[in-house]
Amino acid sequence: MNEKNTYVPSRLAIEKAVLLKAEIELFHAEYCAALDGGDVERWPDFFTPDALYRITSRENAELNLPVGLVYAEGRDMMHDRAVAISRTQMFAPRYLLHIVSNVRVIDDKGSEVEAHATFLLMQTLVEGPTTVHLAGSYHDVFVREHGRLLLKRRDVIYDTNILANDLVHPV
């Protein structure tokens, strides 16, 4: 504590926070590489078996409404969605590009880490222009299993009220 009775983190606490933030950024890089590379069937591997994944509007999130555009409880449900996307659904070919920034660790409880980040999802149709497909933020709860971070919960909160009708892939 300093003279004004405010918390001043130690060098060790700062180093730990920086390493955790870097680890979360590396997680996002791998997560986005799988999705951007078209390997949607790897997507569930980033979650715990009992994870919750939801894509919802900012309005619903602010009102604490559980309604989501996409709502998946558990890795098995995510796996079913991923297989449906990669093997059965028919839609125009496209390339995706996720840009994730402003990663912030909100709370580190040791067993769980709450973090937020902003994202921009660009989409390029093979026979069309590149557009901003979705913008918003990730509200995540991470846990560590077997030495690696996994998502226990991911709320994808999008900013716009008008969505393209082709939101197919995980965000």
Image: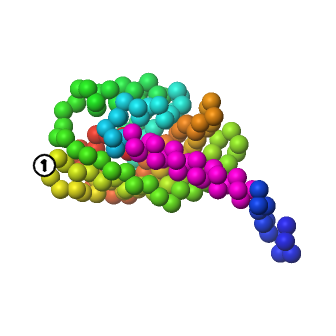
Relative to residue 142, is residue 105 depicted above or below? below
Q: Magenta-highlighted stretch: main secondary structure?
A: helix
Q: Amino acid at mark 1?
A: Glu
Q: Where does residue 65 sit, x and y in percent of width and height?
A: 46, 46
Left or right relative to 97: residue 30? right
Please report the bounds of the magenta region as a residue range.
13-34
Relative to residue 17, is residue 147 depicted above or below? above
- Residue density around tag 1, few if under 14, some if 14–19, many if 20 or more, within 10 Å: few
Position of the C terminus by quadrant: top left
Residue at numbered disc 1: 127
Using the rendered image of the protein, determine whether residue 99 is visible from the camera's viewpoint. Answer: yes
Residue at 53% in and 38% down: 151
Relative to residue 105, is residue 145 depicted above or below? above
Relative to residue 105, is residue 27 depicted above or below? above
The stretch drawn in magenta includes residue 104: no
Position of the N terminus by quadrant: bottom right
Left or right relative to 110: residue 47? left
Q: Where does residue 10 sit, x and y in percent of width and height?
A: 79, 61
